[in-house]
Image: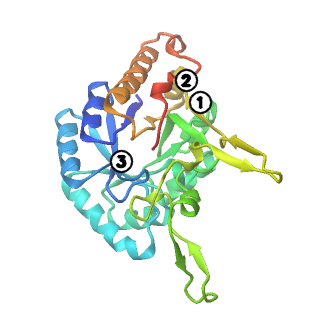
């Protein structure tokens, strides 16, 4: 039976997701998770969330989906050791190198290759299985038949992000904020006076995601003509396909949206819980589906 994995960006959101029927919840550790401080938990909140999940008999997973610089890796390993001491057993990581290091250093942990790792095919899944990942997250663009082939790899759990925003960039690997919000730095060993933009969307203090790709851009042409355009993105909801994914062998049905407020998150989780349970009992899951979820439930960040 597949589990429903919900996001949460605050302690209140953790409680809302659990109340709505989530089987497990994932949160970000402040400073080490994509999305910035608005959707991350500090250590006190994290400990409280861990106790809450444990009391409900559910699991709290931690997203460490940054791509740390070399000088940050020792600090990250210290954070992971502290998480293990806290009783956390599943980490979601976004960097292949970090995944291999964590597998060697912390063999007792379950490591999930985040959606930002870019896996979409059975060959991709086999690659992460060989690296030692316990699970891999596939985007909602991968249908049930393709998911079945991925599940056939064996030795690794397959997760599908059944509610997400598909963007024109690969999740977790966008550098656009660097060119808009961050300050340039001198180029070491370069031409005198030359600078380069540094940072990425991966770190709250070093380079947060400002959802630039979801903002309107102004295009200008010679002669002063101006036009406002948005970069392509779309909300994906595989609500009607939950039963098919379960039949395909998908282990985890995952929702995106750690920045959703608790009330909206609870409604979102509750709708997927209802549809999933109906599908598992033989009712037609598509009966509960809509072409798109209401705008208030749209993912507004990661």
Q: Which residue is mark 3?
A: 38
Across and down, in percent, residue 297 comes to 45, 27
**Quadrant of the drawing holding the C terminus:** top left
Q: Residues within 10 Å of mark 1 (few under 14, many from 20)?
A: many
Q: Residues within 10 Å of mark 3 (few under 14, many from 20)?
A: some
Q: Quadrant of residue 120?
A: top right
- The image's mark for residue 241 is 2
Q: Which residue is mark 1?
A: 144
Across and down, in percent, residue 74 comes to 34, 73
Q: Give the CA separation, mark 1 to mark 2.
A: 7 Å
Across and down, in percent, residue 58 comes to 26, 36
Relative to 119, say whether 278 is above or below: above
N-term mark: 3 or 2: 3
Q: Quadrant of residue 229?
A: top right
- Residue at (48, 66) in percent of width and height: 97
Relative to 241, say whether 194 is above or below: below
Indicate left or right for 23 with 237 as reference: left
For the residues bearing labels 3 and 1, Cβ distance under 8 angstroms:
no
Relative to 176, say whether 125 is above or below: above
**SS class of the residue under badge 1?**
helix
N-term mark: 1 or 2: 1
N-term mark: 3 or 1: 3
**SS class of the residue under badge 3?**
helix
For the residues bearing labels 1 and 2, Cβ distance under 8 angstroms:
yes
Indicate left or right for 10 with 264 as reference: left
Indicate left or right for 24 with 176 as reference: left
């Amino acid at each position: 039976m597949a589990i429903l994995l919900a996001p949460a960006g605050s302690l209140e959101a953790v409680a809302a997701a659990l109340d709505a029927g989530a089987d497990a919840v994932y949160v970000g550790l402040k400073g080490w998770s994509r999305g910035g401080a608005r959707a991350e938990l500090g250590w006190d909140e994290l400990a409280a969330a861990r106790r809450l999940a444990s009391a409900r008999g559910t699991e709290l997973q931690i997203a460490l989906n940054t791509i740390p610089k070399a000088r940050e890796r020792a600090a990250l390993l210290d954070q992971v050791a502290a998480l293990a001491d806290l009783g956390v057993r599943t980490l979601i990581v976004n960097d292949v190198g970090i995944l291999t290091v964590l597998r060697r250093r912390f063999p007792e942990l379950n490591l999930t290759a985040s959606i930002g790792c870019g896996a979409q095919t059975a060959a991709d899944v086999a690659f992460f299985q060989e690296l030692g990942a316990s699970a891999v997250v596939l985007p909602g663009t991968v249908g049930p038949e393709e998911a079945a082939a991925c599940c056939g790899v064996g030795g690794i759990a397959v997760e599908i992000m059944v509610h997400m925003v598909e963007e024109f960039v690969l999740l977790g690997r966008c550098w656009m904020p660097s060119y808009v919000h961050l300050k340039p730095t001198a180029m070491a060993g370069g031409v005198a006076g030359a600078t380069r933009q540094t940072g990425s969307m991966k770190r709250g203090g070093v380079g947060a995601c400002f959802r630039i790709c979801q903002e309107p851009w102004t295009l200008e042409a010679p002669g002063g003509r101006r036009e406002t355009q948005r970069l392509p993105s779309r909300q994906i909801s595989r609500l009607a396909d939950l039963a098919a994914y379960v039949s395909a062998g998908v282990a985890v049905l995952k929702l995106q949206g750690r920045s959703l407020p608790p009330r909206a998150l609870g409604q979102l989780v509750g709708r997927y819980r209802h549809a999933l349970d109906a599908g598992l009992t033989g009712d037609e899951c598509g009966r509960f589906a809509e072409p798109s979820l209401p705008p208030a439930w749209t993912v507004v960040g990661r």
